[in-house]
Image (cartoon, coloured by chain):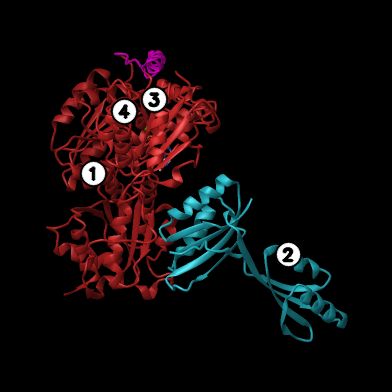
Chain colours: A cyan, B red
Amino acid sequence: MRHVISILMENEAGALSRVAGLFSARGYNIESLTVAPTDDATLSRLTLVTRGSDEIVEQIVKQLNKLIDVVKVMDLSQYSHIEREMMFVKVGVEKNSACEAVKRLSDIFRGNIIDVTDKTYTIELTGDSSKLDAFVNALKEFRILEVVRSGSMGIARGEAALRA
Amino acid sequence: MELTGAEIFVECLKEEGVETIFGYPGGAVLFIYDALYKQQDKINHILVRHEQGAVHAAEGYAKATNKPGVALVTSGPGATNAVTGIADAYMDSVPLVVFTGQVPRALIGNDAFQEVDIVGITRPCVKHNFLVTDVRELATTIKKAFYIASTGRPGPVLVDIPKDITVARCEFHYPKEITMRSYNPTYKGNKRQVRRAVDLMLEAKRPVLYTGGGVVLSGAAHELTEMTRELGFPITETLMGLGAYPSMDKQFIGMLGMHGTYEANHAMHKADLVIAIGARFDDRVTGNVDKFCPDARIIHIDIDPASISKNVHVDVPIVGDVKHVIIDLLEELRSRTERPDPAALAVWWNQINEWRKVNCMKYTQEPEGPIRAQYVIDKLWELTGGEAYVASDVGQHQMWAAQFYKFNKPNRWINSGGLGTMGFGLPAAMGVQLAYPDETVACITGDGSIQMCIQELATCLQYRLPIKVITLNNGYLGMVRQWQEFFYQKRYAMSTMDTQPDFVKLAEAYGHVGMRIENPADVEGALKEALAMKDRLVFMDFVTAQEGNVYPMVPAGAGHNEMILV
Ligand SMILES: Cc1ncc(C[n+]2csc(CCOP(=O)(O)OP(=O)(O)O)c2C)c(N)n1
Ligand SMILES: [Mg+2]
């Protein structure tokens, strides 16, 4: 099963490689990973998407908690939660017809066109991962030059919060 | 007053009450060595002959005393030479603080002379590590290192110190206490789980206590013994746990696992309740997990939550320090009016005694035949009254030592369990002897293993360490040969040592006493003679049966009830 795991950790050199190293050393898989400092500059928040049986994910959470730099861990999959991912897609629009069609698709998916040249459109899109997949799929008939995805980040709904 | 980083380093060690450290100098740690030189009356620095030896010696010291061991090495090759010892300490949860020199900060990342990213290299095999980037953080970092290494589930912590930090100056202040928001080990077990565990103990008809190195590390041997007696249950120990419960006691059914006793493994297989204490269900213990304890409910007490239900599903997990939890279990048990069912226990003990009759460790020492390794260890045990500290290397001799030296006290059996590091024995014995100068320290080793850190014989002379090196010389990498005999149709690929040094001359060249013993009749006399030499290292080369095998054995992939006997 797919799990979204949120990790609050010391904003220190090496902390990220401890987390990444744990996954490779123990053979767990990382589907996506995103990390940045929080409102408290001494803390970073990392969201990691992984797949595994309940036993494996339980082990992952325990092993993460064991890392000295890790302050707190939350398996968001156990909460009602929201997930978002951001994507940039650069599409070739040499043909006039392509301009119109790409613009229309971007509107349907509530994307923003953030850069335009006579040959390319660059679209910014936010949503959960499956929406992003669907958009890339819809663009298949055009010439996709680049896809940049941030990886998922997540937050629990309501009162539940991951704080130090 | 302002101190240099190097002076701060020494002050921190003094604050931590460190008396002995093991190390080897080099460019990056010259200022530190200079500071140590000026305070040599305060800190006893032991100069080893190879950095691997420094770390194993620190491990031996720590395993015997339960205090953190300390090693100091230079950057680059000094640091990489220390890695095996660090990994060894990680696998066996040994509290250790290892200091490595590093190139000056300005050169880090430049492929400078003797630069390695030791923090990166050791990340997967330390409990934690630090690169010090500011002299003002040095003291706090060292405080944290000792705190992390010696609390919770102990382990090695590495502190990498760039050379320029050792000359930079700042005000010295050693924090009295340290709190870390990200590290708070749990010591007290959950009350409700303690009650559930006692419920299961009282219901059990075929219980077994299965205890490991955690009992030794937690200093809980006394409490374990008390609880075991109160319950009247059989107890088996892992390789790492030997000595926590007196081996000569009738409730002790021997070591379990691959080379454990017939009775211990069969009891595990038939048990309806397994109480695992400070043990981690290692694959050498469980054998095939699908066949492991098929009828048992399992209680697991461990300080490390990640050990629980990692390999085997646990019914009642109790996260906490073994000693604290046993005290709570005893209290709960004593507050109950019920007692474990005596009739059921009597039946269970009858069954266990039947298994005991198999006498799975029997061997014969023919008077004319080659010396049996088992016989040497038996005699050593007799002559030392089971009271010696025994450091071991890795191989058949290690298993025989575990089987035949019956430990009655914890912290006396010093071996490399998790990593299985050949070369561990001699330097570990040095660490033990330095901690306990007046005790008998034996190193049981093999003709292969002893050559992996043989250079430490020079260290032993320099510091007059009267270790009794007992080499069980079978002319083979015996454990490898045994597997080749069993599983590779006797194709002894590279397990024969075609040439060997003359160990007697070698010992003498290092300034020690050497002995070669070839006849069974001479074993006892030679051991007596060696043990009587209180101030000399004696290197005993016992020429033993070449193709002896360690029995009994649970082959890889088999269940506990599928042991090979002889
Ligand atoms: C550093 C290291 N290399 C290789 C091994 C694999 N190994 C395990 S036991 C063994 C043989 C040990 O030979 P010896 O020390 O003579 O002991 P014996 O088994 O003969 O008693 C070997 C090579 C190991 N455990 N450690
Ligand atoms: Mg050998």
- Is B257 positioned to the left or the right of B364 in the image? right
Identify which residue is drawn at 43% across, 58% down.
Answer: B121
Residue on which the image places disc 3 = B546
Which residue reaches farthest right?
A97
What segment is highlighted magenta in the picture?
A: B342-367
Mark 4 vs mark 1, foreground winner is: 4
The alpha-carbon separation of the residues under discs 4 and 3 comes to 40 Å
Q: Quadrant of ligand 1?
A: top left
The alpha-carbon separation of the residues under discs 1 and 3 comes to 36 Å
Q: Quadrant of residue B230?
A: top left
The alpha-carbon separation of the residues under discs 2 and 1 comes to 59 Å
Residue on which the image places disc 2 = A133
Chain letter, disc 4 residue: B
Q: Kindly state the secondary structure of the residue where label 2 is placed.
A: helix
Marked residue nearer the N-terminal end (1 or 3): 1
Chain letter, disc 1 residue: B
Tags 4 and 1 touching, CB below 8 Å: no
Same chain for the residues under marks 2 and 1 in the image = no
**Where's the C terminus of chain B, which quadrant?**
top left
Identify which residue is drawn at 39% across, 74% down.
Answer: B107
Circle on res. B366: none
Task: Evaluate whether residue B78 shows in this view.
Answer: no
- Is B179 positioned to the left or the right of B261 in the image? left
Q: Where is residue A137 in the image (x, y as percent from the top left)?
A: 78, 66
- Is A116 positioned to the left or the right of B285 in the image? right
Q: Kindly state the secondary structure of the residue where label 1 is placed.
A: helix
Q: Kindly state the secondary structure of the residue where label 3 is placed.
A: loop
